[in-house]
Amino acid sequence: MKIAVGSDHGGFLLKQEVARLITSLGHEVLDMGCYNEDSVDYPDYADKVVAEIEAGRGEKGVLVCGTGIGMSIAANRSRKIRAALCHDLETTRLSREHNDANILCMGGRVLDTNLALSMVKLWLATAFTDGRHQRRIDKMS
């Protein structure tokens, strides 16, 4: 699977860890930046990840900023995107099972790295359960 990843400066270090994990799980990483801890604007990187998914070059995405809030707001401007801001394993699992989230958003300054990596593993391994949830997703697309 091709997974687009992006961050701002506040999420850069966690994004690097996430990219290594994704690669170790056998997936291809499309790194859309940023590429260091210099201050940047999170909407620019959310837009790059969203564009990869909208164009079909990436199947899913992971976005990281300081809290994950800005990235989730920026990514969800697209009707094709269901970016879920998750903060624990339960919200991560439900974002896939119930919402078919195609972008996982996390906060690099508010999550423990081990928890964040566990969230990514779970998110990638969890399938959408369809059924009544599809009807709700259709109303947003």
Image (spheres, rainbow, N blue to C red):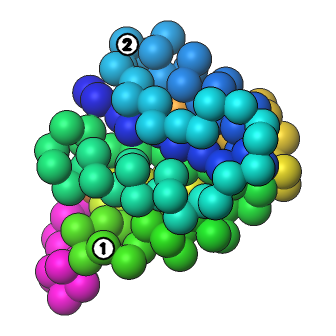
Q: Nearer the viewer, residue 15 or 93?
A: 15
Q: Quadrant of residue 11?
A: top right
Q: Secondary structure at mark 1?
A: loop
Q: Is residue 99 left or right of residue 55?
A: right
The region drawn magenta spans 129-141
Q: Which residue is mark 2?
A: 26
Q: Which residue is mark 1?
A: 78
Q: Quadrant of residue 119?
A: top right
Q: Is residue 11 left or right of residue 70?
A: right
Q: Residues within 10 Å of mark 2 (few under 14, many from 20)?
A: few
Q: Nearer the viewer, residue 33 or 67?
A: 33
Q: Secondary structure at mark 2?
A: loop
Q: Nearer the viewer, residue 140 or 29?
A: 29
Instruction: State yes or no: residue 96 in magenta.
Output: no
Circle 1: residue type: Ser
Does residue 64 sit above or below 16 in this rendering? below
Q: Which residue is drawn at the image coordinates 27% and 46% (left, top)?
A: 52
Q: Position of residue 108 (x, y in %)?
A: 76, 47
Q: Which residue is drawn at the image coordinates 61% and 59% (left, top)?
A: 42
> Looking at the image, which residue sits at the far bottom?
139
Q: Earlier in the sequence, mark 2 or mark 1?
A: 2
Does residue 118 sit above or below 29 in this rendering? below
The N terminus, quarter of image = top left
